[in-house]
Image (tube, rainbow, N blue to C red):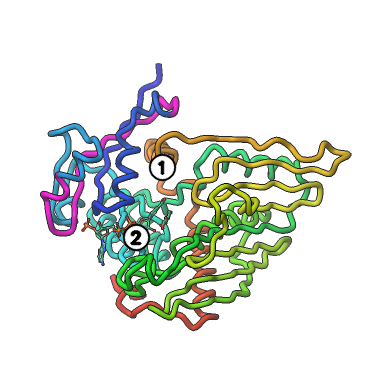
Amino acid sequence: MASTFELKWGILSCGWMATVFTKDLVLDPAASRDVTDVKHTVVAAATSSDAGRAEKFLSDCGVPSGTAKAYGSYEELVNDPNVDIVYVATPHSHHFPHALLALNAGKHVLCEKAFTVNAEQARILIDVAKQKNLFLMEAVWARFFPLSIEVRNLVASGKIGDVKRVHADLSLLNDVETAFSPTHRMVNMDLAGGALLDLGVYALTWVFQILYHLDEDATTPKVLSHVQKYAGTGCDETTTIICQFPRATGIATTSIRVGGDVDGLGTAGPAMRIYGTKGEIQVAHPAWKPLKYRVILPQEAGGAGEWQVRNMPDGGWYWEADATARAIRDGKIECETMPWKETISIMEVMDEVRRQADMTYPAAIESTAH
Ligand SMILES: NC(=O)C1=CN([C@@H]2O[C@H](COP(=O)(O)OP(=O)(O)OC[C@H]3O[C@@H](n4cnc5c(N)ncnc54)[C@H](OP(=O)(O)O)[C@@H]3O)[C@@H](O)[C@H]2O)C=CC1
Ligand SMILES: O=C1OC[C@@H](O)[C@H](O)[C@H]1O
């Protein structure tokens, strides 16, 4: 029987996202998802300043007592010789310095979305990973779901003909003024807040994982965009992006003010629509974790298919963790499901949207000094 590859994780920061990701890491891969070739061990976690909070985090996440170190600084975490890979789960504004810290300490890195604040920061991280021969990936979990793979395969099979247009939305109904204090990471410009980097990146993911792959020598699409700003902080609130690829058009929309699924029942219809010359694929809201899709063909070719439901127990972040482990096991420093070129291209699109809207983040977080 083939051996199981073990990947030892260090968790950098102990907030909401770090918690749900770590809870997925401690699940038994065989029992939770029938995976036996890789497994994950959480060997350390750190908060920025309080080892006691890291200790509580480990316990809350179900990491067996005494099996992981708790640190009160990120420096200690990245220098722990037992850690193979560092998972970065701080706000977008801090991904660049924290991923760099881990790479410079010789650790592989899985870094939350949005990968960085701007494309130049992404290029620098990738250059460092290449120089040091270390794995580096943007943690876009939505790409790794079985549902996403099925949809990409259906498109590649020609089932809906040549794809000419993709419309993808991730919009969440909020009374922004009361939902988020001005310091909250969703709206705080010091933390690269706003719809674009937090939610828009998912809409762009659906556009890109279909349209960027229609051409072998894909480059960043031309962009036409419009941004409505949140008066409270100046971040983007409702943003529309038209991406012009050589043979197709992507329309990505996002909002933290209006909703794409207002009643939570799907009444609004699918959040993602992939339009081909022979049919359409619809994928249900939310773009970050859709649980069903269907194919619609003309009546004479079969009409509308049943919704294909792909429920995901627990979080579902384990799929990207498994892909990370397999890549590292196989000596790869880049994962083909979330290639560096595509991360940079999506960052370039978001840079261009901000340029067109005259929207910059504070210089301290746009910085590329390293
Ligand atoms: N893939 C997914 O499904 C999701 C991804 N995310 C991504 O995860 C990241 C973190 O999101 P989330 O967990 O909600 O964020 P939190 O607001 O919970 O913050 C995460 C951690 O970042 C550190 N932090 C918080 N505020 C600041 C600050 N002002 N300055 C410096 N560090 C700070 C803290 O680290 P410490 O504990 O060390 O003090 C905190 O625990 C974001 O990039 C987000 O886009 C978020 C939700 C879902
Ligand atoms: O990635 C995310 O998915 C869930 C959202 O609530 C969150 O804001 C975002 O960061």
Q: Within the magenta stretch, is there residue 333?
A: no
Residue 47 lies in magenta, yes or no? yes
Q: Is residue 301 left or right of residue 334?
A: right
Q: Residue at x 34, y 44 (%)?
A: 21
Cα–Cα gap, marks 1 and 2: 26 Å
Select label 1 or label 2 by which is in front: 1
| Residue type at tag 1 | Trp
Magenta residues, as a range? 33-55
Crowd tier of the residue under label 1, counting other residues whose Cα lies within 10 Å: few below 14, some 14–19, many 20 or above = many
Q: Label 1: which residue?
A: 317
Q: Which residue is mark 2?
A: 128
Q: Residues within 10 Å of mark 2 (few under 14, many from 20)?
A: some
Secondary structure under badge 1? loop
Camera-nearest residue between 68 and 53: 53
Name which quarter of the figure residue 251 lies in. bottom right
Q: Residue at x 36, y 61 (%)?
A: 125
Q: Of callouts 1 and 2, which one flags the residue occurring earlier in the amino acid sequence? A: 2
Pinpoint residue 135: horizontal percent, then vertical percent: 37, 48
Horizontally, residue 349 falls left or right of residue 198, namely right
Report x, y in % for residue 45.
20, 47
Decide if ligand 1 comes within 8 Å of the CB at mark 1.
Answer: yes
Number of numbered discs visible in the structure rendering: 2
Q: Is residue 330 visible?
A: no
In the image, residue 13 lies at what x, y percent? 24, 54
Residue drawn at the location 33% of the way across and 64% of the way down: 96
Image quadrant assignment for residue 99: bottom left
